[in-house]
Image: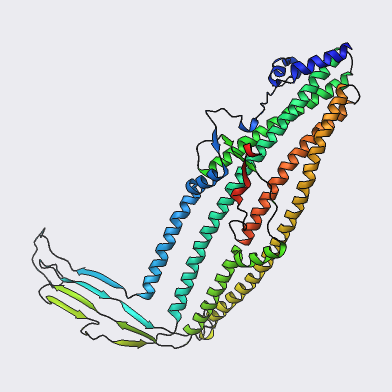
Amino acid sequence: MKFIALVHLILFTTLPSIQSWAQTEPQEETKAKVIRPTEKLSQGEPAHQSRQLSLKDTIEEGLRNNQESKERDYQKAKLEIGFKRNFHAFWYPQLKLSMNYGNQRIDSLKHLRNRGNTEESSTQTPQGYLGLGFDDYTVFNWGKDYQQYLNTKKTFEQDKEKLEVQRRQLRFALIAQYFNLVRVKEIMNIRSEQLRQASFIYRLAREKASLSKISKQEYLEARENFLKAQQYYNSAQDDIFEQESNLSTLIGSDNTKFVLIDVLRFRKVPVTNLEAKQKSLIGNEHIRNSKIELENAVRSYEIAKKENLPLPKFSINLGTYKKFLGKDHPGTGFETHDGNNDIELAASVNMTWDLFGSEGFFNEKKREESFINKRIAEIRLRSYKDRAQSKASSLVDNLISLERNYDVSLLRKENGKKSLDTTIDNYIAGKSPFINFSEQLENYSESQINLENVKFQHLVKKMELAETMGIEDFMGASFEDLGIKRTLL
């Protein structure tokens, strides 16, 4: 009876406050700093250092402030400039303002006797012209210039789309990093509860040992279990520090302490295996790039064949208006060529064939190289189609497996809780050995951690599937909606 009363007294005085247990822990006995976990460790950072952050705030701030995102904005502007230059060069005549003046004498620094021809010496009168005119404008070139323009246009569209893909990947990285931090904070809460339970049993074992109710071995086992729980808790804290730093870098924030408002809501994948494979053939990044590369390779092969034929180039010179200065030719004039002011449509052929040399007989090597590039692009496209469909199918299968694992993990967590409570009651009553408590506590903690890991792995696989399909979100299931406030749980 005295022992039961003593147990009740221990339970009454120790359960309300972990901190009071830590303060009464003898330093020479544990030889380790006792951790005092709080009840809400996911929001346990000091208020003056922490910042509240929701999932939507994370995405918006990351897309706005991330340094790589800022760089992409300038890269996009640079691509626009390059394409506009190519567009105007192909479609419009090039109107230019030119200025040409010879040497004009400002002053003579030293006078010498003339000993030769002075025609090349500078004069006090400016010699030259100011002109406004056009370069030669190609009217027809058998489609070679147009095909080259299309290659440049498609390459521009491809590079621009790559920037959009990088933006989507950043969005996915922000979502993954936010929920990864949620995961490690939840794991720290789990380890905190494990430490609380281990600390209680350890103190109970110490009281039992002082009354000679248990062996020294059982007492040391309880102490070992308590110290192991402390190590788990410390490791969980280290993981939080690392993940908070990663999130801070992604969103471009100086703050490295966050109180997360949202937690991860588990939702099953909303697409079938067949739908995933079909959509991946349309939106997959590698397939789209390979299609553009194949189109460019086909056009380049056609250009190579035409360049090996003596096809005339038709062009027109729209001329130049010039304002002449000097004593010899003062005034204003218009000319298309030297001494000619007629606007003419001209045809020209400029061809050279190698009979023996680096380009092969009649430049055959250049044509063969273009054909090989076309064949490589065709093979690469087929390869990426096979890979995309295979990966999409595999990811859907993995997601379905994780969903079954999630259901099992939920049942395991509920069963582990009941089993642990029963084992603690039996241990306190002396009906169960300590080893049973240690195993059940470890099993329950691991079941909770496994549940958090399965939820996060399922999210990562879903985003990987969306990336394979080339989409931002699944139909009717935005990734931003996966965040639910803790108060609504």
Q: Where is 355 relative to 182, above or below?
A: below
Percent across and percent down for residue 223 are 80, 22
Q: Is residue 94 visible?
A: yes
Horizontal side of 435 relative to 69 (left or right) equals right
Q: Quadrant of the image for the N terminus?
A: top right
Percent across and percent down for residue 120 are 16, 71
Q: Nearer the viewer, residue 92 or 337?
A: 92
Percent across and percent down for residue 245 are 57, 38
Q: Where is 2 relative to 417, above or below?
A: above
Q: How is the image coloured?
A: rainbow
- The residue that appears at 65% across and 32% down in the rendered structure is 237
Residue 36 occupies quadrant: top right
Q: Quadrant of the image for the C terminus?
A: top right
Q: Is residue 387 visible?
A: no
Residue 180 occupies quadrant: top right
Q: Where is 474 relative to 363, above or below?
A: above
Percent across and percent down for residue 21 are 72, 18
Q: Where is 427 relative to 371, above or below?
A: above
Q: Residue furthest front?
A: 488
- The residue that appears at 55% across and 36% down in the rendered structure is 52
- The residue that appears at 70% across and 46% down in the rendered structure is 455
Q: Residue furthest top?
A: 2
